[in-house]
Amino acid sequence: MKPGIEETVKKVHELFRNKGLTLSIAESCTGGLISHYITNLPGASDFFISGIVAYSAEIKKNILGVSPETLNKYGVVSAETAREMAEKMRLLTKTDYTISTTGNLGPGVLEGKERGRVYIAASREGKTVSQELKLKGNRADNKEEAAISALRLLIEFMK
């Protein structure tokens, strides 16, 4: 792991382990990269419960339970879908916190949304926040930046 990423992941580990909280992750465009980062360090099993890669709209609906109305009205690349992915994953796994990612890493346009448009969300009981990212790198850089941004959002959200 790159140094900046490793510090962020260590901070997540520390927060969850010290507070005795649990985490699950619903990833789309990051394709499991956040789960990979979390499990790269020892001790993840103390707090990390589940990670699901819900890459297709069908899996977002049928496994996570994102409403067809949300997907039809806002699309898979939207703050609304990211928020619903996080909320549904938290309920599904009964964890204290969840983060999610959905977006367009490129190279083309998806649902009229340009390459690099990504939405991340964090959820706990009673509150969900989301953030829009406009990433400018190549596909691999955007994926990494979306993953680390989601972890940073989680850290801020836990304060």
Image (cartoon, rainbow, N blue to C red):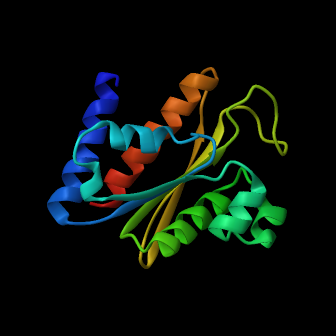
User: In the picture, residue 96 is in which quadrant?
Assistant: bottom left
The reply, left or right, for residue 81 in relation to residue 37 is right
- The residue closer to the viewer here, 48 or 87, is 48
Which of 147 and 153 lies nearest the eye of the viewer? 147
Q: Is residue 149 visible?
A: no
- Give the image quarter of residue 35: top left
Q: Can residue 51 be seen here?
A: yes
**Position of residue 74 measured from the top left corner of the image (x, y, whole percent):** 78, 60
Q: Nearer the viewer, residue 138 or 60?
A: 60
Q: Which residue is pictured at 53% across the width and 66% down the height?
A: 89
Quarter of the image that includes the C terminus: bottom left
Asked if residue 34 is positioned above or below residue 145 in the image, the reply reads below
Quadrant assignment, res 85: bottom right
Q: Is residue 82 left or right of residue 57?
A: left
Question: In the figure, 150 relative to 73: above or below?
Answer: above
Q: Position of residue 16 (x, y in %)?
A: 24, 58
Residue for point 50% across, 75% down: 91
Q: Residue at x 34, y 25 (%)?
A: 1
